[in-house]
Image: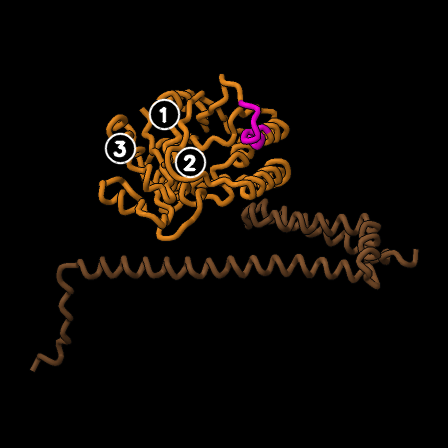
């Protein structure tokens, strides 16, 4: 048993993945997140849960690939998955930037049309004090 | 008679939009319509303007859900009693609007223009997704929806306000399933659909798989945890 993932870590992993799942579903419940965006997190917490319940699969894989310690494989796997997710997030933020710029420009151009189609600009109010004398 | 708005979401539909809208204007002048151009990269918007169509022109691409929601917000703000989606590629035939409206007036909240009420659903690979979604809806709601992926859907005032205001209300089967679970009355009316004559289907294999994963998770898992936001009526909100 000394080569197994420590019991404390396993319990933490199980609790962490369950917690993630509950947190995500709670946010969806209050309509804080779009369903498309929850799919990744549901799969991610399912992966964590799977690893924590069936660490044997991981031992087999780390043996096969030549990792010194199976925990390294866990870290590598998680870091990789998060990296990929970070990449797709960057992509999305970038697209949102472009959309936001387009939107702001559209609003400004429309406003310009409104302003320039107004017949007469209101004449500036003259300050009475200067013309009193 | 109920005041109906036909929402026509259009993304790169320059080849078919005139045929669809001209048909509506000439043969069905009793219905109001609005084309929602979803930031098309072709001449869709220019054609609509040149022809004088009623157009809402989105400056960026929002996707089908966002475009359709735009149409529903318009309907909510302009006092329509009901609204429906009609595809710009000519698949949906307006001759079936009248029977759908009748069913809505009979007290349905949502009416689906369905290909498979009296006609048997073909057992082809293309229909596999439809079978799976029907099964998932039946499992979670106990109700049979013969054609869950049909985009030809009509909503009454209460539902169109709910669709107009909430995120996670895409015009997709998972929303239908969620609403059935929450007590909405959904009925199907048998319709025929035309084959698309121009443009390409949005769904390729990868997108189909992605769509099925989303629908599966959403129908089987996520909707159990969703809380329905009972809304203040649209017009009272903005007072």
Is B26 colored magenta in this rendering?
no
Shade of chain A as shown in the rendered figure: brown
Front label number (2 vs 1): 1
Where does the image place residue B68, in percent across and percent down from the top left? 41, 41
Label 3 marks a residue whose chain is B
| Chain that appears orange | B
Residue lying at 18% horizontally and 58% vertically, measured from the top left: A117
Circle 2 packing at 10 Å, graded few (<14), some (14-19), many (20+), is: many
Residue A40 higher or lower than B134, as above or below: below
Of badges 1 and 3, the one in the foreground is 3
Residue on which disc 1 sits: B97
Residue B169 position, x and y percent, is 49, 40
The residue indicated by pointer 2 is B160
As drawn, is A41 to the left or to the right of A118? right
Q: Is residue B140 left or right of B20 when viewed as pictured?
A: right
Quickly name the residue at label 3.
Answer: B22
Residue B208 picture location, percent across and down:
55, 39
Q: Nearer the viewer, residue A19 or B27?
A: B27
């Amino acid at each position: 048993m000394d080569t197994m993932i420590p019991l404390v870590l396993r319990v933490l992993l199980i609790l962490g993945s369950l917690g993630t799942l509950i947190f995500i579903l709670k946010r969806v419940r209050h309509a804080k997140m779009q369903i498309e965006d929850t799919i990744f997190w549901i799969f991610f917490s399912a992966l964590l849960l799977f690893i924590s319940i069936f660490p044997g699969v991981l031992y087999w894989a780390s043996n096969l690939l030549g990792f010194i310690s199976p925990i390294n494989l866990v870290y590598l796997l998680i870091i990789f998955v998060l990296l990929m997710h970070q990449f797709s997030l960057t992509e999305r933020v970038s697209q949102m930037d472009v959309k936001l710029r387009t939107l702001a420009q559209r609003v400004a151009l429309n406003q310009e049309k409104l302003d320039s189609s107004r017949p007469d600009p209101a004449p500036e109010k003259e300050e009475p004090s200067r013309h009193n004398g | 008679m109920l005041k109906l708005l036909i929402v026509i979401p259009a993304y790169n539909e320059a080849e078919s939009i005139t045929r669809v809208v001209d048909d509506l204007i000439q043969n069905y002048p009793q219905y109001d319509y609005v084309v929602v151009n979803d930031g098309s990269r072709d001449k869709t918007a220019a054609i609509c303007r040149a022809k004088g169509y009623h157009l809402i022109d989105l400056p960026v691409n929002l996707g089908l859900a966002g475009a359709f929601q735009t149409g529903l917000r318009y309907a909510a703000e302009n006092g329509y009693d009901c609204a429906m989606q009609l595809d710009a590629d000519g698949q949906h035939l307006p001759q079936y609007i009248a029977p759908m409206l009748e069913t809505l007036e009979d007290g349905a909240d949502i009416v689906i223009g369905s290909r498979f009420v009296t006609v048997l659903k073909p057992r082809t690979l293309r229909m596999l997704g439809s079978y799976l979604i029907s099964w998932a809806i039946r499992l979670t709601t106990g109700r049979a929806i013969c054609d869950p992926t049909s985009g030809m859907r009509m909503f009454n005032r209460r539902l169109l306000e709910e669709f107009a205001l909430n995120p996670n209300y895409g015009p997709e089967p998972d929303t239908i399933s969620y609403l059935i679970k929450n007590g909405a009355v959904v009925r199907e009316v048998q319709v025929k659909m035309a084959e698309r004559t121009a443009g390409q289907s949005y769904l390729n294999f990868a997108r189909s798989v992605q769509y099925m994963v989303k629908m599966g998770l959403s129908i089987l898992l996520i909707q159990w945890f969703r809380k329905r936001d009972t809304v203040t009526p649209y017009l009272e909100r903005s007072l």
